[in-house]
Amino acid sequence: MVTADPYRDPAARRAYLDQEARLRALPDIDRDLVRLGQQPGLHQWLEQIRATGGCAAPIYLAGHSITTDAGTGEVLHSYSTDGEPGSRLAVRCRNRRASRCQPCSREHAGDTFHLVRAGLIGGKGVRDEVRTHPRLFATLTAPSFGSVHRAGACHPVRRRRCQHRALLGCGRFHDGSDPAVGQPLCPDCYDYTAHILWNAHGPALWKAFRDNLYHHLAARVGIGRGAVRKLLRVSAAKVTEYQKRGVVHFHAVIRLDGPTGPDSPPPAWATSPTLLDALHSAAAAVSLTAPPSAAYGTVLLRFGTQLEAHELTVHLGARVTDEAVAAYIAKYTSKSVESAGAVDHRINSLADLETLRVTPHVRALIGTAWRLGSLPELHHLRLRAWAHMLGYRGHCLTKTRAFSTTYTDLRTARAEHTRAQQLFADWDSETVTESTWRYVGQGHTPGEQLIAAGIAEDLADSRDAARAERNSDAARQGSR
């Protein structure tokens, strides 16, 4: 069927103009969906988005790759984006934050689970013997910077008032979703400066704790501080979580290895009870001083008294198991400062702060970080650049090198597995792949975003259904 030329045929021109008028009357997202439905290669684009898991902000690349036989030089496979819609290929954004991209944050959490699990029970290049090493799961918190509303039964009402005439109590019961949780009883009494400085020195506090742990282990068995590092190694992985009050605390898995790492056993005296005892005293002994300033004087930084630590075991029915800890830590890698009511983008000026839809407490924290960032003695902390993170600039998850595998190794193994399944299943020879890629864009149009969200939801429903079926099969087999 030949379509009439609207430039020559009056009827075709009228039909074209009528269609354009109808499109202009549609909402932006509907108009974009019509555009998508008419574009060539829609099926290919949908396959790309399914391959990214429904990524909310995919990165688009242009380029090509050629795979050849390493011995003969024969071209086994070639690919170019010239045949793709828009001559580009969508790949995952790999953002770990669920607030930015739920599909990619789920994949990152899955990688974190396997990374931590490998450090607890072996696998992924870590020897299985690590499960016999002393291992603890610990939570290290910040001290109090002032009384805040807490979930459950809040502070009981008292007759006394603070110096600012605020009541020293609440008397209410708050559920976990109550916006009052984490807000100070008296903002004027709250030490916002110490709060921001504690967050900013979080990485230094963690390092001081790990160094102290070596020293306190040495003291308990009567050996020198230098000698203990030649006898064992403290391997650890920690994840950072924001409390409702906006201060960070650390959940950590700590393991004792021999001097060469997980492939060697620790000394006989390095037991879980010894590690547990040393952990408490090492955390209590941490004491750092923030750079002194005429603006705030001297601020001493220490860990809080609420420290929890539990021995880990692989036995079913135990209070804390390896699998549960790995899942617990993985969960927090997809969260960030927004869990404390802050924002996940940088603040460029105090004028930006005034437009944020945040609580007065968070606004005061960001404002304090911004003001402290102007002090010369604190320039190295880059508080203005990290004001939106309430002063904390460390990574969400850190680990010692010998604890387990790495994210890069996990992603490389997944990519190689996918490549072998899709392309090289019948090839026995060694292959060489040469690729050239360039960045050409990122993100979705409104219509594309709606479709990608639907794909992500369908994939999530499929996973849930498959999990439910596996659990049902396991339950049936267990009842036989």
Image (spheres, grey):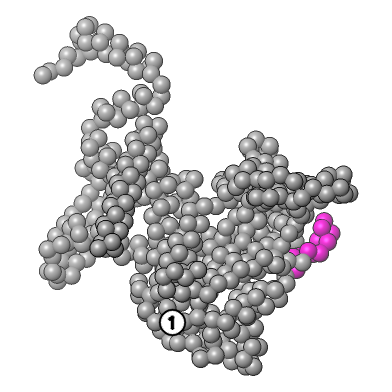
Residue 357 place in picture, x, y as percent: 63, 37
Residue 252 left/right relative to 410: right
Residue 421 left/right relative to 344: left
Local crowd size for mark 1, using a 10 Å CA cut-off: few (<14), some (14–19), many (≥20): some
Residue 408 left/right relative to 140: left
Instruction: Tell me where residue 57 sits by quadrant.
Output: top left
Front residue of 32 and 378: 32
Residue 442 place in picture, x, y as percent: 40, 43
Residue 470 left/right relative to 274: left
Q: Say what amino acid the circle numbered 1 marks.
A: Thr
Q: Relative to 288, does residue 219 appear above or below in the rendering?
A: below
Q: Is residue 293 covered in magenta?
A: yes
Instruction: Tell me where residue 429 sits by quadrant.
Output: bottom left
Front residue of 68 and 315: 315
Residue at 68% of width from left, 62% of height from top?
142
Residue at 82% of width from left, 56% of height from top?
295
Residue at 62% of width from left, 77% of height from top?
279
Residue 428 place in picture, x, y as percent: 13, 69
Residue 289 place in picture, x, y as percent: 75, 68
Residue at 21% of width from left, 6% of height from top?
11
Q: How many marks?
A: 1
Segment colored magenta: 289-299
**Helix, strand or loop under label 1:** helix
Q: Which residue is mark 1?
A: 132
Screen quadrant of the C terminus: bottom left
